[in-house]
Each structure stands twice: as C-alpha cells, then as structure tokens.
Image (cartoon, helix red, strand yellow):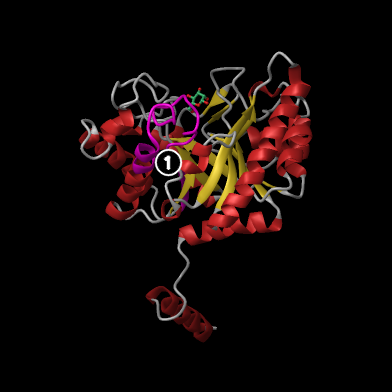
Amino acid sequence: MKKILILAALALAACSTGNKKPMETPKDLLVHRLFTYAEKGQIAYGHQDDLAYGHSWCVEDWENDALERSDVKAVTGQYPAMVGFDLGGIELADSCNLDGVPFGLIRKAALTHIERGGMVTFSWHPRNPLTGDSAWDVSSNQVVKAVLPGGEKHAEFMVWLQRAADFVESLGEVAVIFRPWHENTGNWFWWCQNVCTVQEYRELYRLTWVYFTKERGLKNILWCYSPNAPFTPDFMGRYPGDEFVDIIAADLYEFIGPDGVGEGGARFSAMLKDILTKLAAISMEHHKLTALSETGLEGLSDPAWWTGVLYPAIKEYPISYVLTWRNAWDKPGHFYAPWDGFEGAADFKAFCELDQIVLL
Ligand code: BMA
C-alpha cells in the first residue's frame, strides 16, 4: 500500500516539475469544464449575487455565516452552478460594492461557492474616473482617452486596476471569470461605443489584461468579452483580440413593452437566437468559449418564461453557461430568479430539472 502511495506521489511530482505532462492549472480545468458543457450540449446556470442576498433577505453577520442561503436553492434544492459578483466600488477601496455588498462577503461567498464545486464570474461597474459619477455617466466622450497612457487620469486609473487586481489576487489559486468593460456596444457606460473610439476601447481592454496578466501575474482568470445584443459591426469591431479573451459572450434582457408578455417574449427570443447563431460561428472561428453572460426578465411577469421563452431560445446553441441577474433584497420588484414563495417558481424548477441545465 505504502509503495503505491509513494509511486503516486512520484508521479504527481513528475507532473508538477514538468518532467512529463505538466499539471493542469485551475484555469485549464475551468476552461475544460466549460468546453465540456458546450460539447455535451449542456448549459450551466448562474445567478448574480446568489449567496450574498436574495429577495427580501441579506447576509448580515457574514464573517459568522455559513452562506447556505440561496433563492435558487430554496426553489430547486440546489445552488446555481455559477455565481456572479460585481466589483464596482473596489476602485476607490470602498468596503462595500455599488449594491452595498461588503467585499469581505464577496470574497468569502466566491471561495465558498468554489469549494462547493461551483464557478464564479466577476463583472465590474467602476465609477466614471473623469467625473467621479457612476459607471452610467456618459456625459463625456473623453473618459477612456483620459485613462489610457498619456491621459490625465492614467496614473489614477492604474491604481484602480491595482485595487481590482489585489482583490482577485486575494482569492488565491482559484480560477474565475472576469468580464470587464461589458455591454460596450450599448450607450449607457463610460466605455460604450457612443463615448469612445474603437481603438480607445480596445486599448482599455488590453491595458487591463496586460496589467493583470503580465504585471501582476494573475494567470487564473478567464477573460470574458461580452458586448450586448443585438449584433452590430462594433460587436467584433471592438473585440480586443484572441490573445486577450477566453470567452466571447453577450448580454441580452427581455423587456416587456406595451404589447405585453407574448410579443415581448417573441421579440426577445428572435433577438436571442440571432445573437447566439452569430456567437456560435464566432466562437468556433476564434476557438473560444461562448456564453449568455447576462439575461433575464425583471420581475418574471411571464409565468412560463424559463421553459417557454428562455429554454427554447438557447437549447440549440453551444453556450457554456447562462447567468440571470440579481434578486435585490431591498427592491421588491428587482429580481430575475424566483424565490421561496414566488408564485411562478414551478416553471423555474422545471427549467432547472431539464437534463441539459446544470446546477451545482
Ligand atoms: C443593474 C441593477 C442595479 C445594480 C447594477 C450593478 O442591472 O441591478 O440595481 O446596481 O446592475 O449590480
């Protein structure tokens, strides 16, 4: 028995010293896991902020809380396969993010979820570095230019990157998805297409990647480029380049207008299929993973949204995961997944029970 253990230890040592096949890094394993889902036609389900709070509850004494509560688990019996968190606020060394979630809780929740076998993705809504207002301040088209080398805010911005990188580094040897400068083909963030040039955007993304990867040596990040649908020339026109990206994804929400649930769902479904068709071809051409990095119907006013709208629209496509947005604890109508007691929970449960949909 002992001999077997020694031989096993030697084999492992050989792997890690590079004598034979090098050991797989946490990033390799996460890439492999996501590619496997896509190859098998499976889709992992993710929910933003899932372990930090839910509809009308939030973790308070996070240092002593085992973080067992989850709206998704309350309804389905399982945690989501992926949990998303937002780093907005880390740039100014705030103790809580833009939605009031302590960064200590975010770190603990992310590590707890990974320990349980789950995956974690980070978005970032940093303030506008030129005006000091929120990420949604598009009053100036000089902001991205100002943070690039030679710009008046460059030195300050590098400190912002340093603080974000410090946070990721503090997670240790785990792989996470990072999705900075998302929805750049919209017109609502200071890095969107209406307020910066193609070149400026690409330099912003690359500057971030180079700082994290080369200067800080943070090698366990899967970089996700996620413009919003619909597909426009800017979608790939602003692509930073294959070297800087692991996942080419898209964000798309359903909005119900005056025409009601049925029409809203049909419009969303058509747009979703269109963008996923393009993403399937693009990800294949670039040898990248693909995903639906943010989606949802706020308030879930369509009782059959999961199995009637979302699932039929995504089931044919090789997306590795789909993430729905947060269930705000302090805004009763701002939720994107059911919670315990929500009357439309059965449809979500049915969606999660489909063979193709992966929870934790
Ligand atoms: C938006 C809303 C906001 C929130 C922001 C960042 O979609 O949920 O309430 O502050 O995301 O999480």
| Farthest-out residue, bottom | 3
Residue at 45 percent across and 30 percent down: it is 61
In the figure, is residue 318 to the left or right of 158?
A: right
| Farthest-out residue, front | 233
Instruction: Write down the residue under mark 1.
Output: 107
Q: Quadrant of residue 243?
A: bottom left
Q: Nearer the viewer, residue 220 or 246?
A: 246
Q: In which quarter of the image is residue 344?
A: top right
Q: Height in image: 84 above or below 360?
A: above
Q: Height in image: 19 above or below 156?
A: below
Where are the magenta residues, as a range? 175-203
Q: Position of residue 123 (x, y in %)?
A: 46, 37
Q: Nearer the viewer, residue 254 or 17?
A: 254
Secondary structure character of the magenta stretch overall: loop
Residue at 69 percent across and 28 percent down: it is 340
Q: Does the magenta stretch include residue 108?
A: no
Q: Position of residue 172 (x, y in %)?
A: 38, 52
Question: For the N terminus, which image quadrant?
Answer: bottom right
Instruction: Please tell me how crowded label 1 is: few (under 14), some (14-19), or many (20+) other residues with Cα within 10 Å.
Output: some
Q: Does the magenta stretch include residue 183?
A: yes
Q: What amino acid does circle 1 point to?
A: Arg
Report if residue 93 is visible in the image: no
Q: Nearer the viewer, residue 323 or 115?
A: 323
Q: SS class of the residue under badge 1?
A: helix
Residue at 50 percent across and 29 percent down: it is 186
